[in-house]
Amino acid sequence: MTEPTLAAPAITVTGLRKSYRDKIVLDGIDLTIPQGTIFALLGPNGAGKTTTVKILSTLVAADPASGPILVGGHDLATAPQAVRAAIGVTGQFSAVDPLITGIENMRLMADLHHLTKAEGRRVAAELLERFDLTDAADKPASTYSGGMKRRLDIAMTLVGDPRIVFLDEPTTGLDPRARHAMWQTVRDLVADGVTVLLTTQYLEEADELADRIAVLHDGKIAAEGTADQLKRLVPGGHVRLRFTSPQAYQEAGDTLRDAARDDAALTLQLPSDGSQGSLRAILDRLDANHVTADELTVHTPDLDDVFFALTDSWPGGAGASQAAASDSDLAEVTDRPLENVR
């Protein structure tokens, strides 16, 4: 019986390097992005996020010292035209022409993709309906709100039916309602099998959308993993147990002698990374002594804490990344030599 083959990654990047004269922008980064997933690149301004997108979308050449880069199964160096046929790009700045209508923007994009007139009209109408822009299709794009322009921008990106879409800070400047609408748009793309590489400075956005996240800093990947894995890198996570019975509280305190106590609130607090194993260990100790908590809450650091720690930009000082996690934690999440993480 033949074993089923796993789908090849949508994007594979090995040793990506880019310099401008003596300025190193990307210093040998590796990425593997599975098909049909959302991968987020986080990083401060100047970290190299947009440069990465420009290289993967064939707009900028990687340095010759870079390793092989495959996008949609095509070698970026030898088959750039095939890569372009497989991707769509929505940049930081809208590609929408404000002087023409929404439908004219869509038909212009269809012409650029060499669609027939009939096919272009069909695709444009379908995408405008999908992005709830049909009623505004005949209005000049200059009259659109920021969220409408962004939706039109993505609709234009999808005219060529790309299977990989690069979204470079797609919600910058949008209000919270428009941002949440854009998040649903991204989820819908992935539900249709599209792979999305997202760059963003909104940590909540990465937390909400991404299957995996990489933190880019000083041209290197500082850490990579799921949102939960990255949050466990940062100290400060804990479990809080609350009791309504003073007797149960006292018995729990006697059992969990390493817990911080709040006698007034009848709560105990223990350090925890929030993992299943950590919680089980605490509950097993209570069960062994027949003690039951009335309420258990898990508190973990958020991506803001991760971002500040790994990029040395925590307000408390530059040593934050060294305090953020043990070497074994970083090695587990990044799967990279530790000398490339600092």
Image (cartoon, grey):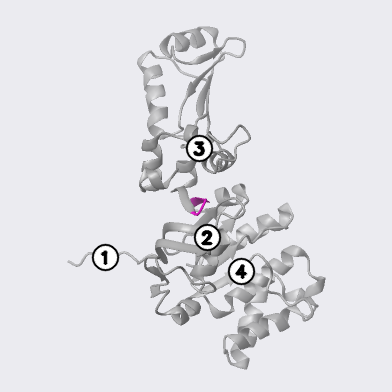
Which residue carries the number 4 mark? 90
Please name whichever residue, 61 or 118, is drawn nearer the observer in this view of the structure: 61
Question: Which one is in front in this view, the residue at disc 3 or the one at disc 2?
Answer: 2
**Label 4: which secondary element:** strand
Which stretch appears magenta? 214-219
Tell me if 113 is positioned left or right of 8 in this view.
right
The circle drawn on residue 93 is: none
Q: Secondary structure at mark 1?
A: loop
**In which quadrant is the N terminus drawn?**
bottom left
**What residue would you read off at disc 3?**
321
Q: Earlier in the sequence, mark 3 or mark 2?
A: 2
The amino acid at mark 3 is Ser
How far apart are the two marked residues, 2 and 4, measured between alpha carbons? 29 Å
Residue 123 in view, yes or no: yes
Q: CA distance from mark 4 to mark 3?
A: 32 Å
* Mark 4–mark 3 CB contact (< 8 Å): no
Give the number of the mark in front: 4 or 3: 3
Q: Around disc 2, counting alpha carbons within 10 Å, would you say few (fewer than 14), some (14 to 19), or many (20 or more)?
A: few
Location of residue 162 in the rendering, given as x and y in whole percent from the top left corner? 51, 75
The residue sitting at the front extreme is 22
Say if the magenta span includes residue 124: no
Q: Which residue is mark 1?
A: 4
State the CA–CA distance, disc 1 to disc 2: 47 Å
Q: Amino acid at mark 4?
A: Thr
Disc assigned to residue 22: 2
Q: Quadrant of the C terminus?
A: top left
Structural distance between the alpha carbons of marks 1 and 3? 42 Å
Residue 225 appears in the picture as rendered? no
The amino acid beneath tag 1 is Pro
- Disc 3 versus disc 2: distance between alpha carbons? 26 Å
Q: CA distance from mark 1 to mark 4?
A: 34 Å
Give the quarter of the image for residue 152.
bottom right
